[in-house]
Amino acid sequence: MLLSLFIILPLIVGVFMLLMQGQKPQRWLGAFVGGALLALYFFITCKGGNNELTFQTQWFNFNSVKTYFALNAQGLGGLMLLLSNLTYLALFVYLSTTKQKYNNTFYGLLLITLAGLNGVFLAADLILFYFFWEVVLIPVYFLIGLFGIGKDKIRANMTFFLYTILGSMFMLGGIVYIGFFLQPSSFLLTDIVQVTGPHYSTNTALALLFLIAFVIKIPIFPFHTWQPTIYKTSPTPLTVVLSALMAKMGLFAVVTWYLGMFPTISELFSYITYIAIFGLVYASLIALSAKNVKKIIAYSSIAHLALIFVSIFSELANGVTGAYFQMFSHGLVVLGLWLCIDVMERKYDLTDIKSIGGLAKIDPTLSILFMVFGLANVALPLTSAFIGEFMMLSALFTHNPVLCVIACLGVILSAVYTLRLSSALLFGEVKNIKRKDAQKGGFGPIAVLSVIAILIIILGVYPTPIFNLLAH
């Protein structure tokens, strides 16, 4: 029953904040929710019994197929639950220290998004999973529409909405087919597998319906075109949620639901790994040529997520575990990168790689933190990203050396565009920066960024706690 609080608490507080129109923004409520849920996570994890990590009660019947309100915080779902609430705690503490001019509607919608995200990572019933999958879309749509940046925000929002709705329709079609024609005893994964296994030829098309829905959300080339524009036009707090968490929804769904429901035909769609690996190199080349900072980070994220996706299909334990670890690590790294970019935007009017320069001479602390996140982005040893990337590439080499070589090209390009970005912003002659600007913002944002950076380094040196959570 405690697992329900991961959904109920942010939902109630989010709705409460929506009702606080015209009042002083209550950012501390968001930090409270993130902190309380993080404490709850560690409580149920340390207690460790199945009664705390799972919850199930019958919900309703769909064409005589039982649907359960079933939650499960074990394995990858538990790790993603940790990432989502840790991200929200860091994000709201950061927002509280910077006192940005968002109202209670903004913060309320963010918390409702958290309720949906937690629901996606906890859901153990396919209908329940689909419900939360759709719930996430609603507040995000309004966040972009009401608080988006730039003249392209309406077009970007519609593109995002149409892409995700298209994917949802594919998944809904698959769910309806399972309910009406395959008719498992329930929509629990263990029961669905019993009916999907014997129908190999039919399930080829059925699996494709789910796969399309999931790769759109990640996104994987060629379904990626909505992402860079939406990152550019979204307010930074929402961009953090999109990049660190919503992208993981798709990867989590591939692991838990696609490979869970169709384990016998996973090889049939392994060719999509070639498309994904092409997308990795393509995204890296775009990031290398881009000048807008947000566009560079967006395409960098596409490239890293593509490598994780390919590693999941390596079907080797080392590669899959590395992919899980990298999902968590990538969330921390992009959290740090986006918050650093936000500080630079507010203090120095950062827009592209030519807008400022020589930041290291004026603001060395922020520059050091940005370099830590940048080096983690290229998987430097002693950072968390190195652990996951090394495991993924080693498994990929065993599985398919050609894919591994192409992936390594993407890794090299990642180092090039990340160092290019760091060099342009941090070094060289001081450009468009006044020394007094370095005093803006106070110590709070630096403290939050420092904690994230320290966590990345700790996990790079001692990753065992994450592996223990995965084995829980």
Image (cartoon, grey):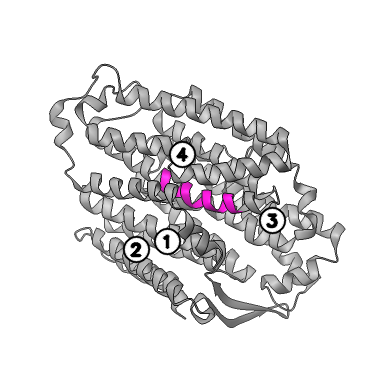
Question: Mark 1 packing: few (<14 Cα in 10 Å), some, or many (20+)?
Answer: many
Q: Secondary structure at mark 2?
A: helix
Circle number at residue 34: 2
Q: Kindly identify which residue carries mark 3.
A: 210
Quote the CA–CA distance across marks 3 and 2.
Answer: 31 Å
Q: Nearer the viewer, mark 2 or mark 4?
A: 4
In contact (CB < 8 Å): disc 1 and disc 3? no
Circle number at residue 381: 4
Question: Where is the C terminus found, in terms of image quarters?
Answer: bottom right
User: In terms of image quadrants, where is residue 24?
Assistant: bottom left
Q: Nearer the viewer, mark 4 or mark 3?
A: 4
Observer-nearest of 279 and 73: 73
Amino acid marked by disc 3 = Phe
Residue sitting at 20 percent across and 27 percent down?
A: 362
Q: Which residues are magenta?
A: 321-333
Q: Position of residue 40 (x, y in %)?
A: 38, 72
User: In terms of image quadrants, where is residue 107?
Assistant: bottom left
In contact (CB < 8 Å): disc 1 and disc 4? no
In contact (CB < 8 Å): disc 2 and disc 1? yes
Amino acid marked by disc 4 = Pro
Q: Is residue 99 visible?
A: no
> Which of disc 4 and disc 1 is earlier in sequence?
1
Q: Kindly identify which residue carries mark 1.
A: 114
Q: Is residue 449 left or right of residue 311?
A: left
Q: Is residue 440 visible?
A: yes
Observer-nearest of 53 and 224: 53
